[in-house]
């Protein structure tokens, strides 16, 4: 018996699989990518029956036929990794559709536990499900009714998992489902051939592989071709041709029809549906949120509220973290280095002006991303994100695409890299290319800190307007780009039909939302402490190397006299028409090609890290550790109070968009109303940019060539020529848009 068990969770999207995963693993989980793939891989640890169990959350899939990368991963994991148990999670309200994949897993011979999830929702909609009869008709597999969001049935599910995991391999059972006689005869012949090949029989279940060959599944055929099983493939082709000639239908059609007939028979025998379809709360909400005319305004209103939360509600916490990095943390590092005799050396400059100014300048934005991911988690867990794709379907049709193409665009708001790979769900290569091209104009989380710091510096409480404008501009440019390409490079391509399942609305759970936030925020922090740390060191080194001065002036020159400054000055004139031809801005854009987070990091190093630290007055004692801790507690309380105030003020700010209204905002600390609570970088930016140039700079950051990870993903998916075309196009569009914003603003007298 293995000491370490592996349990796989499999099922259709929106069946509650991830909710069960979160409930079983809690915070003991991590996210990565499948080897050789880019689909997210979620694994976690659970303790069941006193044993440590590895839980693997397989990608959501509708079948085990390898039409998509998610289906391939799910199938291959079950076939090749041999998990001790597979929990097939099905939606009790959509049982008939979900059973297709369950039937395929039974044919695969997986050690199965069936979790009939959302049983509470099914009962509230007056479904009557005979669970014991359902288990019997599915071959006696263990079956547990669950309502994972309420924790119902999870203990019974763990018991069933233990039972199946501890069970000795059973003797082969008669197949649950038999096919028409000619198909069964072909299966028998292929099974005999497979079992005669020890290597092949040890790798795949013989009957399952025979069915796959008769289904003419391209992925499996390619694998067998690569391993030299041409005789087996030729035998399968002969059977397919013979059945097609005799019955007028290929084996795949006969197999699929027989499966659906079996499932329909099982469903009729075990489920009694209400005589009249119940109008659910989800139906009533969708009457508004997916309405033909109201859907889009509601979507825009929700996005407006999200950006208000991101820009203003997070601002007090942003200022708190900035004051900690620039104040106590920098003093503590300097004191520690002084205690070991390294004070005033290049190492102190590297750590404070390089690493702390760069990495710390980005860690300041953790509160911003926390609130962004909180908003996304609430929208996703509530079920609204799928509605957003539905609402946008009409507009995507203008581009010759459909609403399904909008999903990668939504993913792009978090990160453009997975958004590129999310285009794999689209069937046609041209649709994938066009959608991926548009996706990079979606304002990813890495660009958000740039908008926030400039918005706070130049527009104060109205910074949410800038952020909202940048997101809307990205969407607009993406749509215009799609419109242009569809009428040039992708002319006369028919629009594919759009079919999408809308999950029911659900109240997000605290655990699910927290895990969602933690996964994404911790990933950002890991990136900051690795990639950005390296980038910060490189930028510090380039800023320390003197140009036109003796090398013994290393780390003793002004930034403008450094190697970095000299390199960037040569490129700066190209941005004069856009209003930001300073070498500092150019340098930030150049380093931003590596990762958009580095834009703020570089600006922080140039303007803040390289500046002289405030000098302690001779008669003013240095703050003690207790002084610093006391100040931190006071600032934390102040930030919490201001966060609550900004949250409340979303309501009057939103209502004040209506011209005839003027709702006063809450001001809990009126005596501090006129005090600017700037970060050091914000103050420096106001001295380096005009407001109009700042907006043009943000437009360029939004639109220009994405980060190197996105470029690499684009090249992997679509090749070098398409990637180079995309890079040139985005760079040109960004320059043109920034120039139009700046020059147009000057003509309107906004300079």
Image (spheres, rainbow, N blue to C red):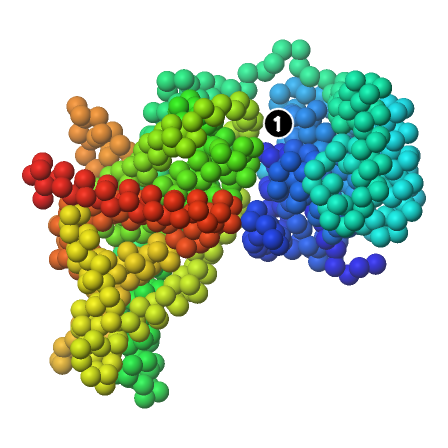
Say left or right for 303 vs 204.
Answer: left
Question: To which quarter of the image does residue 684 belong?
Answer: bottom left
Location of residue 360 with respect to 87 vertically, above or below: below
Q: Which residue: 64% across, 36% down?
A: 67
Residue 468, percent across and down?
Answer: 29, 38
Question: To which quarter of the image does residue 262 belong?
Answer: top right
Position of the C terminus by quadrant: top left
Helix, strand or loop for disc 1: helix
Position of the N terminus by quadrant: bottom right
| Circle 1 Cα neighbour tier, 10 Å, few/some/many (<14 / 14–19 / ≥20) | some
Say left or right for 7 vs 200.
Answer: left
Identify the residue at the far bottom of this view.
341
Residue 213, percent across and down?
Answer: 78, 36
Location of residue 485 with respect to 463 vertically, above or below: above
Identify the residue at the far top of this view.
275
Q: Which residue: 36% across, 66% down?
A: 535
Q: Mark 1 = which residue?
A: 121
């Amino acid at each position: 018996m293995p000491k370490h068990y592996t349990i796989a969770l499999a099922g259709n999207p929106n069946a509650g699989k991830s909710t069960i995963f979160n409930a079983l693993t809690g915070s003991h989980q991590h996210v990565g990518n499948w080897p050789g793939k880019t689909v997210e891989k979620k694994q976690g640890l659970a303790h069941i029956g006193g044993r440590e169990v590895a839980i693997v959350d397989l990608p959501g899939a509708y079948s085990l036929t390898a039409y998509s990368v998610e289906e391939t991963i799910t199938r291959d994991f079950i076939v090749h990794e041999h998990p001790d148990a597979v929990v097939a999670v099905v939606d009790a309200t959509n049982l008939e559709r979900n059973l297709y994949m369950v039937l395929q897993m039974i044919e695969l011979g997986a050690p199965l536990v069936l979790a009939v999830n959302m049983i509470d929702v099914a009962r509230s909609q007056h479904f009557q499900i005979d669970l014991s009869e359902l288990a019997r008709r599915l071959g006696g597999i263990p079956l547990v009714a669950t309502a994972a969001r309420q924790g119902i049935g999870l203990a019974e599910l763990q018991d069933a998992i233990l039972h199946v995991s501890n069970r000795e391999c059973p003797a082969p059972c008669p197949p649950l489902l038999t096919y028409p006689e000619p198909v069964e005869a072909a299966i028998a012949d292929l099974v005999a051939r497979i079992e005669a090949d020890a290597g092949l029989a040890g790798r795949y279940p013989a009957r399952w592989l025979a069915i796959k060959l008769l289904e003419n599944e391209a992925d499996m055929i390619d694998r067998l071709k690569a391993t030299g099983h041409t005789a087996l493939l030729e035998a399968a082709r002969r059977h397919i041709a013979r059945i097609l000639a005799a019955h007028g239908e290929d084996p795949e059609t006969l197999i699929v029809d027989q499966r659906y007939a079996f499932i329909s028979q099982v469903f009729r025998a075990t489920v009694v549906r209400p005589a009249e379809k119940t109008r659910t709360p989800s139906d009533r909400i969708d009457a508004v949120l997916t309405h033909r005319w109201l859907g889009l305004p509601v979507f825009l209103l929700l996005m407006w509220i999200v950006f208000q939360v991101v820009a203003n509600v997070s601002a007090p916490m942003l200022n708190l973290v900035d004051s900690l990095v620039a104040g106590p943390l920098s003093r503590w590092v300097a004191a520690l280095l002084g205690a070991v005799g390294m004070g005033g050396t290049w190492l102190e400059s590297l750590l404070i002006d390089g690493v702390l100014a760069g990495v710390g300048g980005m860690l300041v934005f953790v509160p911003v991303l926390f609130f962004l991911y909180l908003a996304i988690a609430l929208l996703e867990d509530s079920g609204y994100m799928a509605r957003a794709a539905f609402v946008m379907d009409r507009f995507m049709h203008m581009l010759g695409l459909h609403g399904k193409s909008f999903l990668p665009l939504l993913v792009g708001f978090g990160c453009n890299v997975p958004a590129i790979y999310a285009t794999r769900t689209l069937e046609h290569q041209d649709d994938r290319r066009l959608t991926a091209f548009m996706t990079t104009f979606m304002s990813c989380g890495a660009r958000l800190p740039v908008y926030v710091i400039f918005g706070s510096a130049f527009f104060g409480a109205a910074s949410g307007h800038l952020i909202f404008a940048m997101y809307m501009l990205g969407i607009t440019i993406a749509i215009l780009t799609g419109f242009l390409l569809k009428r040039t490079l992708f002319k006369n391509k028919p629009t594919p039909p759009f079919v999408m399942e809308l999950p029911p609305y659900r109240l997000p759970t605290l655990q699910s939302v927290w895990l969602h936030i933690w996964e994404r925020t911790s990933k950002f922090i890991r990136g900051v402490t690795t990639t950005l740390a390296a980038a910060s060191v490189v930028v510090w080194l380039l800023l320390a190397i003197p140009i036109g001065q003796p090398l013994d002036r290393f780390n003793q020159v002004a930034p403008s006299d450094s190697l970095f400054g000299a390199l960037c000055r040569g490129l700066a004139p190209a941005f004069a028409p856009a209003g930001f031809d300073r070498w500092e801005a150019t340098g930030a854009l150049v380093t931003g090609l590596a990762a958009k987070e580095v834009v703020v990091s570089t600006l922080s190093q140039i303007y803040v890290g390289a500046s002289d630290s405030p000098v302690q007055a001779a008669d003013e004692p240095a703050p003690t550790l207790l002084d610093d801790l006391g100040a931190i507690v006071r600032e934390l309380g102040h930030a919490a109070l201001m966060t609550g105030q900004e949250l409340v003020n979303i309501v009057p700010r939103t209502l004040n968009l209506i011209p005839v209204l003027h709702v006063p905002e809450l001001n809990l600390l009126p005596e501090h109303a006129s005090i600017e609570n700037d970060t050091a970088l914000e103050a420096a930016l106001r001295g380096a940019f005009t407001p109009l140039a700042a907006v043009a700079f943000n437009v360029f950051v939004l639109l220009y060539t994405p980060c190197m990870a996105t470029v690499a993903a684009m090249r992997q998916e679509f090749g070098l020529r398409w990637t180079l075309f995309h890079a040139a196009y985005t760079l040109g569009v960004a320059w043109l848009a920034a120039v139009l914003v700046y020059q147009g603003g000057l003509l309107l007298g906004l300079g």
